[in-house]
Image (spheres, rainbow, N blue to C red):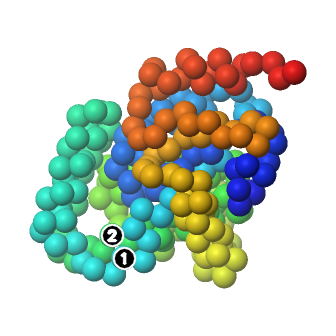
Amino acid sequence: MSDDPQETAERHLLYFADPMCSWCWGFSPSVVRMIEDLPDTLEIRPVMGGLRPGTTEIMHDRAKDSTRNHWEHVKEASGQPFDFEFFNRNDFVCDTEPACRAVVTARRLDAGKALAVLKSVQHAFYAENRDVTNINELAAIAQSHGFEDRAFRSDYEDAETITETQGDFWLSQASGVTGFPTLLAVEDGKAQIVTIGYRRWEDFGPALSAWAAEQRA
């Protein structure tokens, strides 16, 4: 992947997300529709945003209350499932780097599976209350997508994977992304905003599909 969306000429989509971003989980059905409805030749490139990478502070009650409020809004808007038993945890550290790195690891090993792994990490965290900051949980998710356990764990810990994950965080900032999810349509070195924040497929899909179907001169 190029470090700059302006450097590549082919038509594609850049999807900036974080596996532990609740609005990205709400947006997940729209991503599924994109995959189903857009041409197979139009690549959707996931870029990990790094919502709270490197966080070391345990979630306190005020943070839990704020997060619960976000989850309730997302559930109402999107209909996505949430397991609110999460808020009974007493020692959770919301470091999003491990989950982001797991998606980057999948992308490095088999780019075609990266979006599916992203969705599974989201589902594990939000709908199943699994700790996706834990490598054992992340490796189990990867195995469910056909990744060999030892290979996944090895690449996950590789210095190049860590650097590539940090590169995703940098790209998000350098691209001016101010929130997740963000979807950009890139063509001839120019990026256009498709959506910043949660939107239903019905609200942006027809225009994006028309753009994807356009014949290039």
- Nearer-N-terminus badge (2/1): 1
Residue located 58% across and 66% down the image: 170
Horizontal relation, residue 213 to residue 175: left or right: right
Three-letter amino acid code at disc 1?
A: Thr
The disc at residue 55 is 1
Instruction: Return the residue nearer the eye: 84 or 73.
Output: 73
Three-letter amino acid code at disc 2?
A: Cys
Residue 211 in percent (x, y) is at 67, 22
Above or below, 89 against 143 in this view is below
Instruction: Return the residue nearer the eye: 105 or 55.
Output: 55
Label 2, secondary structure: give it. Answer: loop
Residue assigned mark 2 = 94
Tell me the quadrant of the picture where the N terminus can be found.
bottom right
Residue located 22% across and 72% down the image: 59
Gap between marks 2 and 1, in whole Å? Answer: 6 Å
Residue 64 in percent (x, y) is at 17, 63
Label 1, secondary structure: give it. Answer: loop
Residue 138 in percent (x, y) is at 49, 66
Residue located 59% across and 54% down the image: 175
Which mark's residue is nearer the viewer, 2 or 1?
1
Residue 108 in percent (x, y) is at 70, 63
